[in-house]
Image: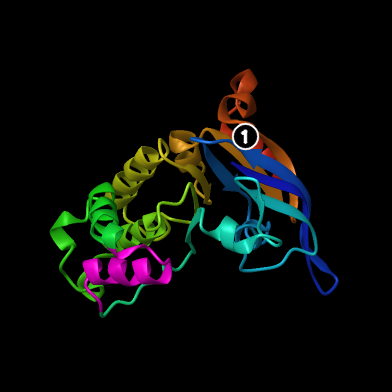
Amino acid sequence: MIEVKSLSKRFGKHWAVKNTTWSVEDNRLLGLLGPNGAGKSTTMKIMTGLLCSSEGQVLIDGYDILTHPIEAKRRIGYLPETPPLYEELKVVDFFDFVCGIKSVDSSQRSRQIDQAIEKMSLQEVAFKPIRVLSKGFKQRVGIGQTLIGEPSILILDEPSVGLDPHQVVELRNIIKGLKKDHVIVLSTHVLSEVEQICDDVVILDKGEVKIQGTLQELKTGGRSLEDVFIEVTR
């Protein structure tokens, strides 16, 4: 479970995130929406411990990301907008490298690497250098590294950006399959993506939560998600 409580982040006089509160339960997929500059990436960086908040709190399975960072980060798999790949490595070697970073016991490494390859459907490229892979496969490798260490929570920043339509469909199906074992927070600009794979939605604008709820709740009265988005961010 993730709990964001009265979270704020200020850069000088500018509030990138301002007094936001929301949560997501186990085995739920939350879409974090908002126009450019809404505070999505800043929020995700605070959630993963890459930035400190100015005010407020983030709890990861009950652990405060600031006061108990090691316990909290062990429970997180994070994909930034640009996947952190070492492209000269083969996929299996990269996953083994990530196992080392995450202090995965040597007796568990092969199992976790095989599991990541299977879940991300990387069997055909597992022994190829990452540099020769298509963008779609590179994105799968990026998500695959979030699974190493068997975290309970996945935080994915724009995972389908730059992919062709076929790759997008494949990746969405993969992400939907991960929900049964993880809490997932996904940021995106693509409203149709949220409608197809998300359970819950938080819409940010100018650093503030404008509306939140289940996808069904936001679409009551016959409104589309696009209608709601335009209404609350205009």
In the displayed structure, 35 sits above or below 191; it is below
- For image coordinates 29% across by 65% down, the residue present is 106
Query: What range of the chain is rendered magenta?
Result: 89-106
Q: Splitting the image into 4 quarters, where does residue 114 fall?
A: bottom left
Q: Secondary structure at mark 1?
A: helix
Q: Return the x and y of residue 95 as percentages of the image width and height.
A: 30, 66
Is 62 one of the magenta-colored residues? no
* Dominant SS in magenta: helix
**130 shown above or below 164:** below
Residue 9 location, quadrant? bottom right
Residue on which disc 1 sits: 227
210 to 146, vertically: above or below: above
Residue 83's place in the image compared with 117, above or below, is below
Of 82 and 110, nearer the camera is 110
Number of numbered markers: 1
Instruction: Write the residue at 33% across / 72% down.
Output: 97
Q: Position of residue 109 (x, y in %)?
A: 28, 61
In the rendered image, residue 99 lying in the magenta stretch gets the answer: yes
Residue 157 visible at all: no
Amino acid marked by disc 1: Asp
Residue at left 45%, top 42%? 182
